[in-house]
Image (cartoon, coloured by chain):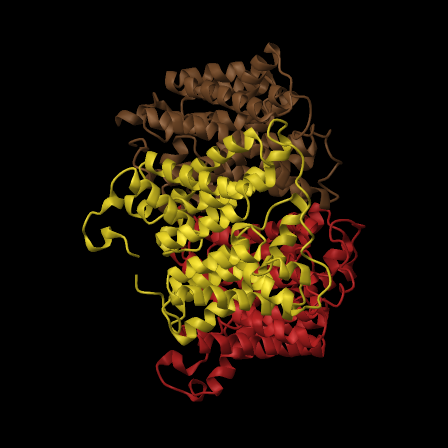
Chain colours: A brown, B red, C yellow
Amino acid sequence: MTHAAENGKRGPLDREPLAYLAAALRGVGQVDLQPQLLTGAFILAGLWAAGWKVGLFATLGTLLSTASAYALGADRGSLSRGLQGYSGCLTGIALVGSLGHHPATYVLTAVGCVLCTVLTAALTTLLGPYGLTPLTAPFCVVSGVIVLGAPSFARIWHGAPAPVADPTSGDTGITFSDLWHAFFANVSQVFLVDSWYVGLIMLAGLACAGVRVVLWAALGSVAGIVAAWALGAPTAQISAGIYGYNAVLVGIALGAVFLAGTGWNAGYALFGAGLSTGLTAAITSFFAPFGGHTFTWPFILTTWALLAAVPQLPRLRAATA
Amino acid sequence: MTHAAENGKRGPLDREPLAYLAAALRGVGQVDLQPQLLTGAFILAGLWAAGWKVGLFATLGTLLSTASAYALGADRGSLSRGLQGYSGCLTGIALVGSLGHHPATYVLTAVGCVLCTVLTAALTTLLGPYGLTPLTAPFCVVSGVIVLGAPSFARIWHGAPAPVADPTSGDTGITFSDLWHAFFANVSQVFLVDSWYVGLIMLAGLACAGVRVVLWAALGSVAGIVAAWALGAPTAQISAGIYGYNAVLVGIALGAVFLAGTGWNAGYALFGAGLSTGLTAAITSFFAPFGGHTFTWPFILTTWALLAAVPQLPRLRAATA
Amino acid sequence: MTHAAENGKRGPLDREPLAYLAAALRGVGQVDLQPQLLTGAFILAGLWAAGWKVGLFATLGTLLSTASAYALGADRGSLSRGLQGYSGCLTGIALVGSLGHHPATYVLTAVGCVLCTVLTAALTTLLGPYGLTPLTAPFCVVSGVIVLGAPSFARIWHGAPAPVADPTSGDTGITFSDLWHAFFANVSQVFLVDSWYVGLIMLAGLACAGVRVVLWAALGSVAGIVAAWALGAPTAQISAGIYGYNAVLVGIALGAVFLAGTGWNAGYALFGAGLSTGLTAAITSFFAPFGGHTFTWPFILTTWALLAAVPQLPRLRAATA
């Protein structure tokens, strides 16, 4: 983090409206749990490269949820680190993908972003006593609820988007081309984008956050591919990153952010990354009957469970904040 | 509250069995979060006006759950304010509506009322550290579990009641007649009753609890109608109060009970009321595959989430108890 | 408990690897919440009597999850009382039953056992502030997730096992033969085994843990049968123990372990045992659409709710630990 506030001096990024724009840009990077401006910039570039709708709604979502956090008086420290923007970023992308590009989608994105701020605050209250953070749960709840309720409402529903391929069946043979595509798509699918070069741009952004971060993003991606292949997941889904984006996030969260850099912790992080891959199938099956969306729930549940266990298991050690 | 206990003197309502009956009557009003005897009396009259089965099971449910709280030694303060009766009131209405009027329904209502006392106590323990209260969750859990399990048991199941209209599709044009019917039905549907005059009687009861209470019940009802219309909900459902009863409860809870009377809080309460309307569709879709019931879950989840957020958002302020 | 450590002296069971084997054997008994070696030995004998696959996977599961708790440094007190083994015991049985006897099942059992250790630790953190314990929830979550996700993965899925009879419909006449079979099968079904003589062996093991324990196991079993009969459950399911194993566990937990031995508590325990029987149907219906498994969820949810209520209800009293 190169933020001037760190060493106690006030720089240009501490003055409105630059402070607000910097907080929003950091918010894009915080989807991958990284507060650096450069990381946010790379990732945002990747999102616009993925298409103008994705880029636009990611930008709008981040700006709106950051603004609503300002308006409601959220903690300035969390605001300036971008912690009020990442759920809005993902919510924008999810809503334009699920509801299509209509005027109502803009309104719902705005409402959803306010709700992200509220849920981030609510989860901070509820998880605080356990030392856990909301992760991307506000996004999963808000987008899940909106997408689940939308078909009931004539003014916001314009028919289902093209069906997503069923991630629970298909051929399991794998080629080198599948493997490297999966490696990068795992990174871009964190943002609901299936594209190897978007994943590559994002990895470049993560590299700006440090060697340890990009290394664990890569290790998480590999762990996801290995686990999915070992279990016998359909190749088309592995290649599209469906079985690995949660592993990337778990890799970053447990490998580079929340735990200390010990050997046992590294093994624990890899275990978690593989676990999130298996959990993806279970959660998808759970959601199927009522039309829920998997989003990043496997990452969230895996990370919460594994972090909550740490205080009871002395072999593992939390990072010293 | 005109209760003599308030100013430290003991009045006739502090002596058994009058104290017990007063606690039960307050319990009817506590469904709408109001402890006044007169409010309870109006609402109870409305329930009997809705039909003798509804009135009888509401009365039985409130009496039984209050009695079981006495027997198990629940806190006298919460008892005398009616906080041990409201879940039983709703459980009685829900069970006679879902299971029909059979001897087994009386037995299940009694069991359900004991269970309401237990769950009210359990949720008080679990939510206490966060400063949240059980709201109507004991009712939703108890009635939901009984209605979900009932078809598996030959001695308590006598066939499904007439199917409820599907709240997720239908015509969206709206007339003035629909609007005023919806306004009152939103109030009566809190008690699972679709009747404009029952809603009117209940609003009269809420007026006895103060201008602020009845104002926020009305504002909540309007917010629910506006939100449902804006989203494009089917007119038949709006008119029957299906999309607004949660908004009425959120309006009362956030507008008149749990938050201070500031402008920001008022906006927050209206946001919550609209939100609960949208959430109604999502929860109904979630419950559809396994046959769960929406009941007042949208109110409960909205209110818990929005109240849990307040400590993190300084623009909003809890009411000083 | 005859363990030498109790009176401060170190006996042979405190030395590795005997301490490890003793902890594992106690773990088998801890499925029924009993730490005695002899109880564990009887129950393990019953499991081998039920079939070599059940016996083998119960043994492997207990050994592996106890070992993983050692490796991760779990609390020695909980380890030596067997509290790190019981979830693994049940997970092994559930996985071989659901996935069949294949090489992949051994690997998944090992992974599942590590995960049981992690979830036991996580739930200990999360439930600690409320004075609740994880009970068999780690088993239910781990086995539920694996069995739910398995059909998506070609390398671990070998087709569904023979379908379990639908527990929600069927004839309700009952004979004496049904009754005594149900009484013992309720005890064996705690371990997913339908066999009256296995249940008898296990009851013998529970008798080694004391009169109060075996009495409450029997009372729970009877309460389950009475409740299931009164509700009108299908006889075939009652007789197979499907409607009573949760009642046995609730009986032991509330009657003999967590609450003091008072009259009110005894009534409360019987109420809970009957309740878990009704809850079994509701949870089975909830799980049906997405293919979840009921396992011991009715016991867990009933016991958590009833124990969380105790501090608010002075008529009831927790056992003095």
Tell me: residue C110, above or below residue B1. Answer: above
Q: Is residue B224 left or right of A4 when viewed as pictured?
A: right
Where does residue A102 sit, x and y in percent of width and height?
Answer: 70, 33
Residue at the spot 31% in from the left edge and 31% down from the top edge:
A319
Where does residue A224 sit, x and y in percent of width and height?
Answer: 52, 24
* Figure quadrant of residue B131: bottom left
Placement of the C terminus of chain B among the 4 image quadrants: bottom left
Residue at the spot 40% in from the left edge and 22% down from the top edge:
A36
* Figure quadrant of residue B219: bottom right
Decide if residue B211 is in sight here: no
Q: Residue furthest top?
A: A176
Tell me: residue A108, above or below residue B37. Answer: above
Decide if residue B209 is in sight here: yes
Between C56 and A131, which is closer to the camera in this rendering?
C56
Callout count: 0
Where does residue A284 sit, x and y in percent of width and height?
Answer: 62, 36
Tell me: residue B290, above or below residue B137. Answer: above
Between B54 and C292, which is closer to the camera in this rendering?
C292
Q: Is residue A140 left or right of B55 when viewed as pictured?
A: left
Between C240 and A46, which is closer to the camera in this rendering?
C240
Residue at the spot 61% in from the left edge and 64% down from the top edge:
B143
Where does residue B301 sit, x and y in percent of width and height?
Answer: 54, 53
* Figure quadrant of residue A104: top right
Q: Residue furthest left?
A: C9
Residue at the spot 53% in from the left edge and 36% down from the top edge:
A297
Between B281 and A116, which is closer to the camera in this rendering?
B281
